[in-house]
């Protein structure tokens, strides 16, 4: 990789992680508010682990994001494949863009009103259903971008050589498109785990349906305490560990 | 294609139509809906220059954020695509990881950084580069910075996706035939990644224009963007009909822009036979 | 990969079941601001009444209003909302009337708290906390102590760029109305335009609009004079005793946070028991000592540590004096013009 690119990448990462480093440091602040530094202390992490509300909200967020990502990645990828091979259709394209451009408060209120109308019981599952709506659009867009430059002749050749459609898909198409699908899934997960307004409106009443953004938005009334920064640090830490482990497992599986 | 289309029809189109229907009714006295009198009053109200100015300013800021995010994100995605394959997924994860924290918390961290007494200003003054703290916060600069920060990774993912399988022999051939690095990039690589660039740009623009937290916090509430406006109508004024009208207009404008982008992307990308 | 999908589907189904089963237990579901009630409220409530308590959080009145308007309040028994919103919910017929027979602790309230402008007789709402809105400032930084809303609206040169105003529409405009000697519930176009012009001029001198961190801006020195609710100013006073609070001479509004029972409540009796429990002297005392707000709960106010009244003078204001101030009322049809005026101010450069 040419040096200029390397430098740019490093610089970009520095930019992305700058506030993260700040919040990690602040989570160790003995003083309660970010306005003054009171020395290093882990007491806020202690408080955090005793804080049931935050822990259960974090768990809920992970569950919702996981399911929303799974469902939307599958459906979105299928959509992308279907769309790229079908005849172009402006209406269909509009339908696929719409979830991205409808303001989230509109989607939130629309879904809650709709669920109320059909007397659909709310809970964490209703959040998942809602999140899949906008995630499908993003996943489809990302995978579609990949498929625009996909060499379909490879598929034809495979079929010509006698492989069945499923085999061709699994052994030829899928591996080639996989990195994009992973990118799309990452995008969907990120969108879901940090999403507040749609989650707030479509959640069931009560703590069992509260997600982390909902909890944090409510907590921030009293300022950004080190405890809140600790939450962010831990969420990142856990994610990092999970990702690291899954990379490890993948590598072993491939070996 | 069917499951996706059905999901969107059932859980997006239908519920949203119910809301857009409200645009043709009036707000009830206490915030409900007055079903008795269908009206076009909301559309007339929306034609006020106030709202058009807000739309225009939001579009301007979103566009600025989009351009900057592309300038940062495209080369970053390119760099990742040039890295060893086994590192690529890890690099993508690392790029997304900061965004698994919480939007509010990250924004507050920026407030700590950009404050007149914050880290950036104190460092600049310490190094003697400036005499007085720079106004980095509660203004348009901070808002654009916040938007670029939060949405650059989406550009990285989208562009990476389209760079991913660009046939490496094409730029190679171009270099072999004597074209310079920039020409190769401009005439071969960029057009082939047009779809990714278009998708990334759309993400940033769309997410920026509807954003309300960043203008609220980093802008000190002094900038009113479309996101704030629509939230206000639905939640503060409890005027769903007018909120529906404004959203409807916003969506119509965005649809036109996105169509333009799709056409441009198709023409630039061409078809890779 | 498929194995993990199976496990996850099982977890999902289990999660669904869990949601259903919690619905069957005898409980009361409440939506409140975070940290607004004691952390051990659920345990104490269960011990006193045998009922489970489930608490959902909302960050602002506007959010919970949006949610309740869209869903009819489905799933919630009790909501904590500020008085103009309680009024609106009542007009929208989304509330269950308060039955005094089920809430004997209503006797703990000050007589004034039973004659509130928005709900005389507490027919649909029960007050939880109340106070004033005024000016919070660093007495060691400002040259002269502020006494009028105009000290904020047209600040002295040395504090230009070091002031903030509340971002919530009703309170933002209230400052302008009061400065002009008008009612905080004004909605006629001429007055709206006058206040709009003043507030647009003020905007040029502001550091920011801020609803939640204005007191920490005072503590850090970023700001010298801010628009504040009295209870929030107390958070600043707790950190820096040079911070003071004053109700401007033109007056303030009386804000009241109330509890209401939704019409869709699955457990209206439980809801009443909850409100009764909250009105106990202990809980009233907790509100004052922990959130540093005044409470209309006389039994609670009488029980507090008297030194708090010295440290936070704004707590000592007598209920009779509080009632001299106007409460914010729902604006009804006036909301449309009001909302446009606020948009004009927020969009002004």
Image (cartoon, coloured by chain):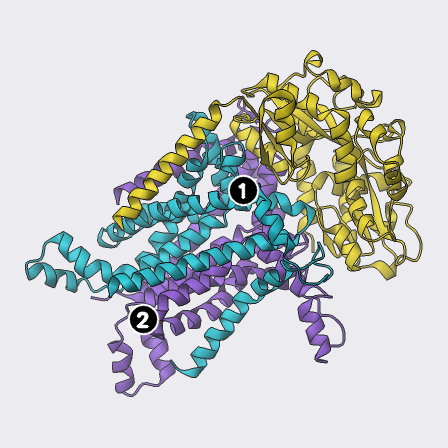
Left or right side of B183 for B55: right
**Looking at the picture, how far across and down is residue A71, in whole percent?**
34, 45
First of labels 1, 2 by sequence position: 2
Question: Could you tell me if residue B259 is visible in this image?
Answer: yes
Residue C237 vertical placement versus B97 (above, below) = above
For the residues marked 1 and 2, what is the alpha-carbon distance in whole angstroms?
A: 46 Å
**Looking at the picture, how far across and down is residue B92, in whole percent?**
40, 64
Q: Residue furthest right?
A: C144
Q: Residue furthest bottom?
A: B178
Chain B drawn colour: purple
Element under disc 1 = helix
Q: Which chain is cyan?
A: A
Can you tell which quarter of the image residue C52 is in? top right
Labelled disc at residue B246 = 1
Image point (51%, 67%), residue name:
B68
**Looking at the picture, how far across and down is residue C157, in whole percent?**
87, 60
Chain C drawn colour: yellow
Could you classify mark 2 by the number of other residues whose Cα lies within 10 Å: few (under 14), some (14-19), or many (20 or more)?
few
* Residue with the mark numbered 2: B85
Question: Could you tell me if residue B14 is visible in this image?
Answer: no
Image point (35%, 75%), residue name:
B82
Quarter of the picture holding the C terminus of chain B: bottom left
């Amino acid at each position: 990789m040419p040096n200029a690119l390397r430098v740019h990448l490093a610089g970009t990462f520095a930019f992305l992680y700058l506030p993260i480093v700040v919040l990690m440091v602040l989570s160790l602040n003995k003083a309660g508010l970010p306005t003054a530094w009171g020395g290093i202390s882990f007491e806020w992490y202690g408080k955090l682990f005793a804080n049931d509300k935050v822990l259960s909200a974090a768990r809920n967020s992970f569950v919702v994001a996981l399911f929303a990502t799974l469902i939307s990645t599958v459906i979105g990828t299928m959509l992308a494949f279907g769309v790229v091979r079908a005849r172009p259709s402006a209406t269909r394209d509009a339908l696929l863009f719409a979830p991205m451009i409808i303001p989230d408060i509109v989607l939130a209120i629309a879904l809650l009103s709709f669920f109320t109308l059909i007397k659909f019981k709310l809970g964490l599952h209703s959040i998942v259903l809602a999140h899949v709506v906008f995630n499908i659009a993003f996943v489809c867009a990302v995978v579609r971008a990949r498929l625009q430059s996909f060499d379909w002749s490879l598929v034809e050749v495979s079929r010509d050589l006698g492989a069945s459609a499923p085999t061709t898909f699994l052994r030829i198409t899928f591996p080639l498109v996989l990195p994009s699908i992973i990118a799309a899934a990452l995008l969907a997960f990120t969108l879901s785990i940090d999403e507040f307004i749609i989650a707030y409106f479509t959640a069931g009443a009560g703590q069992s349906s509260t997600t982390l953004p909902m909890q944090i938005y409510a907590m921030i009334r009293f300022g950004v305490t080190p405890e809140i920064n600790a939450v962010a640090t831990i969420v990142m830490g856990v994610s990092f560990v999970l990702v690291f482990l899954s990379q490890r497992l993948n590598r072993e599986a491939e070996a | 294609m069917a499951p996706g289309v059905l999901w969107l029809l059932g859980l997006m189109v239908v519920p949203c139509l119910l809301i857009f229907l409200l645009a043709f009714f009036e707000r009830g006295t206490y915030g409900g809906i007055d079903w008795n009198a269908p009206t076009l009053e909301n559309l007339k109200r929306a034609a006020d220059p106030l709202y058009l100015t807000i739309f225009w300013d939001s579009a301007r800021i979103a566009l600025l954020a989009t351009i900057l995010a592309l300038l940062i994100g495209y080369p970053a995605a390119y760099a990742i695509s040039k890295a060893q394959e086994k590192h690529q997924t890890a690099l993508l994860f690392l790029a997304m990881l900061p965004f698994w924290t919480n939007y509010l918390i990250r924004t507050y961290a920026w407030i700590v950084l950009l404050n007149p007494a914050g880290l950036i200003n104190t460092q600049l003054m310490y190094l003697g580069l400036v005499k007085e703290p720079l106004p980095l916060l509660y203004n348009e600069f901070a808002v654009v910075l916040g938007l670029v920060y939060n949405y650059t990774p989406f550009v990285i993912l989208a562009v990476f996706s389209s760079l991913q399988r660009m046939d490496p022999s094409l730029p190679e051939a171009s270099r072999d035939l004597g074209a310079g690095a920039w020409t190769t990039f401009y005439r071969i690589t960029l057009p082939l990644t047009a779809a990714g660039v278009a998708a990334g740009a759309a993400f940033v623009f769309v997410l920026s224009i509807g954003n309300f937290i960043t203008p609220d916090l980093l802008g000190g509430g002094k900038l009113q963007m479309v996101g704030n406006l629509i939230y206000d109508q639905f939640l503060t004024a409890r005027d769903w009909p007018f909120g529906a009208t404004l959203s409807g207009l916003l969506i119509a404008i965005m649809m036109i822009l996105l169509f333009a982008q799709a056409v441009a992307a198709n023409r630039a990308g061409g078809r890779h036979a | 990969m498929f194995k993990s999908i199976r496990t996850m589907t099982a977890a999902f189904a289990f999660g669904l079941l869990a949601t259903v089963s919690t619905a069957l237990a005898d409980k009361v579901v409440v939506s409140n601001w975070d940290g607004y009630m004691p952390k051990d409220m659920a345990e104490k409530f269960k011990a006193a009444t045998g009922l489970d308590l489930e608490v959902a959080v909302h960050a602002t009145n506007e959010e919970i209003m949006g949610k309740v308007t869209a869903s009819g309040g489905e799933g919630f028994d009790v909501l904590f909302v500020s008085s103009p919103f309680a009024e609106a919910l009542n007009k929208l017929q989304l509330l269950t009337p308060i039955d005094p027979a089920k809430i004997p602790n209503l006797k703990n309230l000050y007589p004034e708290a039973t004659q509130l402008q928005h709900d005389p007789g507490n027919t649909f709402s029960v007050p939880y906390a109340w106070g004033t809105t005024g000016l919070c400032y660093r007495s060691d930084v400002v040259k002269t102590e502020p006494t009028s809303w105009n000290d904020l609206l047209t600040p002295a040169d040395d504090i230009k760029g070091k002031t903030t105003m509340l971002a919530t529409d009703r309170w933002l405009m209230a400052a302008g109305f009061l400065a002009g000697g008008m009612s905080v519930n004004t909605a006629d176009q001429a007055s709206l335009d006058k206040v709009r012009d003043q507030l647009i001029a003020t905007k040029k001198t502001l550091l920011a609009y801020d609803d939640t961190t204005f007191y920490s801006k005072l503590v850090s020195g970023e700001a010298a004079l801010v628009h504040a609710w009295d209870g929030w100013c107390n958070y600043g006073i707790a950190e820096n005793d040079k911070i003071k609070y004053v109700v401007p001479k033109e007056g303030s509004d009386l804000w009241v946070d109330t509890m209401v029972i939704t019409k869709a409540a699955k457990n209206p009796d439980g809801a009443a028991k909850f409100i009764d429990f909250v009105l106990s002297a202990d809980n009233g005392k907790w509100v004052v000592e922990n959130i540093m707000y005044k409470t209309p709960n006389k039994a609670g106010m009488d029980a507090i540590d008297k030194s708090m009244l010295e440290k936070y003078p704004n707590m000592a204001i007598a209920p009779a004096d509080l009632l001299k101030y106007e409460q914010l009322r729902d604006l009804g049809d006036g909301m449309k013009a009001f909302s446009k005026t606020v948009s004009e101010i927020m969009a002004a450069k």
